[in-house]
Structure formats: structure tokens, C-alpha cells
Image (cartoon, rainbow, N blue to C red):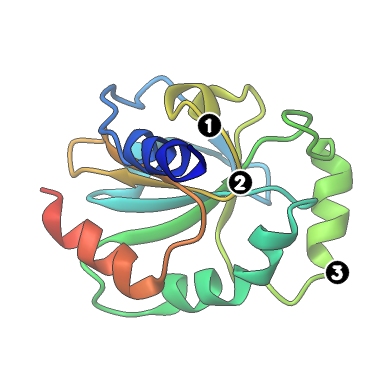
Amino acid sequence: MKKIIIMLMLIFSSLTFSGDLDNIVFKDQKGQVKTIKDFKGKTYIKLWASWCPTCLYTMDHTVELSKEKNLGFNAISVVSPTKKGELNEEDFKKWFKGTDWTALPVLMDNQGSLIKKARLRGYPTNVFIDSEGNIAKVVTGVISTKKIKEEMSKIK
């Protein structure tokens, strides 16, 4: 029974979600307003939380991915202050400044709009955005950098 439940969770975690992200407004660490269209092209988003040990354990990989040149896609991360147990915006900024990951582009979704659109069930969650700014795929849990690149290569 346990194996069946795990299989169902894996199937549902890789379902394709549709919907454009035009109406979602993010803020970067400097307070500048951003939208998904500001990233021009395909984008990989890691949804994470400061309290999530798995997210923090994989953060170095996310930073390295975001620094890679010629990926063919953008790599960013998003947190949702005050949502799902996350710190408020100011406390998150203070906390983040004290980490080794400040090179990582982190956007704040203060309304929690992306976690709703992606139907977030747990952290980390990987959101794959197509070149039109639509959610092409959502995968919950840790996935390798290799797998991220493979998934992004399938998306137009």
C-alpha cells in the first residue's frame, strides 16, 4: 500500500499545470518589482523556504545553476514571505543576508500567487516555465541539476 501511495504522489507531482503568470508580481531583494516576463524566455524556479532543511541542503546546487552561462534558460528562486510558515519579508531579508547564497536571485511572492498557481504541496518545489511565461511542469521534492536541465530542454 505504501508503494502505491508513493507512486501516486510521484505521478501527481509531475503533472503539467497550465496558466500564465502575467498577473504575478514579485519583488527582488532591493524592492524592485519584477514579473516573469522580465526574465525573457524559459525559466526554472525553485520554490523554497528558510525553515526547510532539504531546501537549505540543496541551496548550493541552486546557486551554482543560477551562475551557469549558456543554460538556455533562467534559474531563479522564489520565497513567499508569511506564507506556509515563512518569515515576513524584512526578517527573511535579514536572514538571507547572513547566508552564503546571496548570489542567488531570490524573488519574493508576497501574495503567495505562485504557490497557488503551482499547487504547492511541499518544499522544495521545482517550477518549469515555458518561453510564453506559462507553467509547463511542477515537480515537488529534490531533483538533480542534470534532471533540471533535461526537463528544461523538453520545454519550448
Q: Is residue 39 above or below residue 22?
A: below
Name the residue: 57% across, 50% down.
Answer: 124
C-alpha distance separating marks 3 and 1: 27 Å
Rendered location of residue 122, percent (x, y): 60, 39
Looking at the picture, tell me which residue is in the foreground, 36 or 134: 134
- The kind of secondary structure element at disc 2 is loop
Q: Is residue 26 visible?
A: yes
Q: Residues within 10 Å of mark 2 (few under 14, many from 20)?
A: some
Rendered location of residue 40, percent (x, y): 26, 48
- The kind of secondary structure element at disc 1 is loop
Q: Residues within 10 Å of mark 3 (few under 14, many from 20)?
A: few
First in residue order: circle 2 vs circle 3: 3
Q: Is residue 134 visible?
A: no
Question: In which quarter of the view is residue 138 placed?
Answer: top left
First in residue order: circle 3 vs circle 1: 3
Q: Is residue 115 left or right of residue 45?
A: right
Q: Determine which residue is flagged by label 1.
A: 120
Looking at the picture, tell me which residue is in the foreground, 19 or 104: 19
C-alpha distance separating marks 2 and 3: 21 Å
Question: In which quarter of the view is residue 87 placed?
Answer: top right
Tell me if label 2 and label 1 are in contact, CB under 8 Å. Answer: yes
Q: Is residue 128 left or right of residue 118?
A: left
Q: Mark 2 belongs to which amino acid?
A: Tyr
Q: Determine which residue is flagged by label 2.
A: 123
Q: Nearer the viewer, mark 3 or mark 1?
A: 1
Q: Determine which residue is flagged by label 3.
A: 98
Count numbered badges in the picture: 3
Name the residue: 46% across, 36% down.
Answer: 5
